Amino acid sequence: MTVEVMEGNRPVRDVPVAGLVGEFFGVNAYMDLHALNRLMGEGNAISGAFLSADRADRQSVYDALKGMPGVAGTVVREDAIRSFYETMGGTLLLFTFVITLLAASVAFGVVYNSARIALSERGRELASLRVLGFTRGEISYILLGELGLLTVAGIPVGFLIARGMTAYIAERMKSDLYRVPMVMEGSSYGFAAAVVIVSALLSGLLVRRRLDRLDLVAVLKTRE
C-alpha cells in the first residue's frame, strides 16, 4: 500500500499490509509505533494515547491533562458515549416507535383485509353449513382456523424477508465515515411475531362478530 504523508517533508512510502480489521467508524490504519517512527524519520513521537484511570481519580487526571501545554485535547470516553446516547438515542427510539406503529397498522390491515375477503367469498358456504346444523363456533373454526394457519406459516417467511432486507440496507449504508453492522436479535423476531399474532387475534375477533350476525336467509338468496 502506498502511503502519502501529509505533514513535514511529505514522504511517499510503500508499506506491506499485514492484516485487515473491521471497524464501524472511519477508515483507520494501525502500525507498530517504532516502525512508524522509522517510516516517518522521527524520534520517539506520538500523537495520542489511551489512558485508563480509576473512577475516583478520573476528574483529577482530566484536569491535569487539560493543564499541560503539550496536550492538545482530552476526551473522556464515557462522556462521549453518554453524549451520543443523549443526542442520537432519543432520535433513534422515536424513529423506532413510529416505525413500529406503522408496521403494526400494516400488519393489522393486511390480516383483517384477508379475513374480510375470505368471509365475503365464503359467506354462502358458511351460511349453508349453519343451515345444515353447524354451530357458530364450528364455522368460525373453519374460517379463522385457515386464517391462523396462514398467519403462522407466513411468520417464518417474513423472518427470512426481513433478514434479507436488513442485510441489504446495512450493506448500502456503508461509507468511509461509518459502517452499520447487521444485528438481528431473538427479541426482534419475537416482537415482530407477537405484533402479527396480536393483529391476527384482533382481526379474528372482529370477523367472528360478523359470523355471529350472519344473515342466513339473505346469504342463501345471493345468486352465484
Image: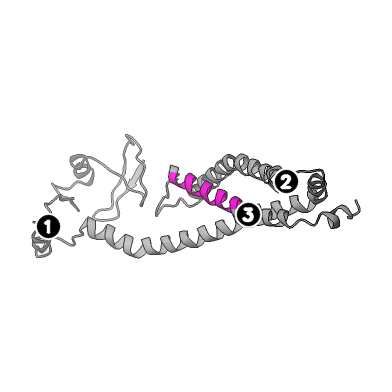
Quadrant including the N terminus: top left
Mark on residue 135?
2
**Residue depth check, mark 1 versus mark 3: number of the one nearer the observer:** 3
> Going 87% across and 52% down the picture, which residue do you hit?
220
Q: Which amino acid does label 1 sit on?
A: Arg
Real-space CA distance between mark 2 and mark 3, rounded to the nearest whole angstrom: 17 Å
The residue depicted at 30 percent of the width and 55 percent of the height is: 6
Which residue is at the front of the view, 6 or 194? 194
Asked if residue 15 lies left or right of residue 74, the reply is right
Where residue 51 appears, x then y in whole percent?
15, 51
- What residue is shown with label 1? 58
Q: Is residue 213 left or right of residue 23?
A: right
Q: Are marks 2 and 1 in contact (CB under 8 Å)?
A: no
Q: Earlier in the sequence, mark 1 or mark 3?
A: 1
Instruction: Inspect the magenta stretch and tell me whether residue 104 lies in it.
Output: no
Q: Is the magenta stretch mostly helix, strand or loop?
A: helix
Residue 153 rendering spot, x and y as whole percentages: 62, 39
Task: Work out whether residue 40 or residue 131 is closer to the camera in this orientation and state it.
Answer: 131
Visible residue check, residue 174: yes
Q: Mark 3 points at which residue?
A: 205
> What percent of the width, then of the height, locates residue 54?
11, 52
Observer-nearest residue: 103 or 119? 119
Few, some or many residues within 10 Å of mark 2 (<14, 14–19, 20+): few
| Residue extent of the magenta highlight | 187-201
Residue furthest toward the top? Answer: 18
